[in-house]
Image: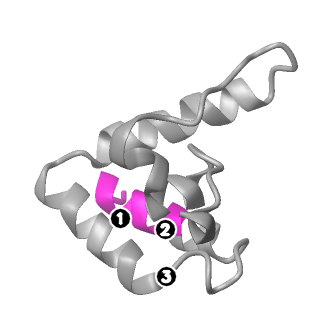
Amino acid sequence: MKTAIEQLRQLVMEGKETFPNREVRTFTLLQELTFIEKRKQADYFLAMHKYVKELKSMPDALIGPGRRWMTASHVCQTLGITNICLGAI
């Protein structure tokens, strides 16, 4: 069984394939994943990924863009937690 950070890394790298290279940089993703791993927050991001994915499947659910650094996070964009265009920031 994979650890939470291994699951998160896999989901993030799979999600990265859906974006043009200029929008989501691998170097930045790896930095963010290291930051998340050091702070033992992988479970939180996995839970948010599942939560937002479920909400997006409901036609009446309203989902905001996120808060603080997460709105500009490459990890959050690849997981579908935020849809902020990072190229415009």
Whether 2 is among the magenta residues is yes
Q: In the rendering, at what x and y percent does residue 37 appear?
A: 20, 59
Neighbourhood count class around disc 1 (C-alpha, 10 Å): few under 14, some 14–19, many 20 upward: few
Q: Residues within 10 Å of mark 2 (few under 14, many from 20)?
A: few
Kindly tell me whether residue 71 is visible in this rendering: yes
Q: Seen from this angle, which residue lies furthest right?
A: 59
Alpha carbon of mark 2 to alpha carbon of mark 1: how far? 6 Å
Residue 55 location in percent, x, y? Answer: 69, 24
In front: 25, or 51?
25
Residue range highlighted in magenta: 1-12
Q: Secondary structure at mark 1?
A: helix
Tally of marks? 3
- Cβ atoms under marks 2 and 1 closer than 8 Å: yes
43 lies left or right of 59: left
Query: Considering only vertical position in the picture, is 40 above or below 89?
Result: above
Task: Identify the amino acid type marked 1.
Answer: Glu
Q: CA distance from mark 2 to mark 3?
A: 15 Å
Q: Are marks 3 and 1 in contact (CB under 8 Å)?
A: no
Q: Which residue is mark 3?
A: 25
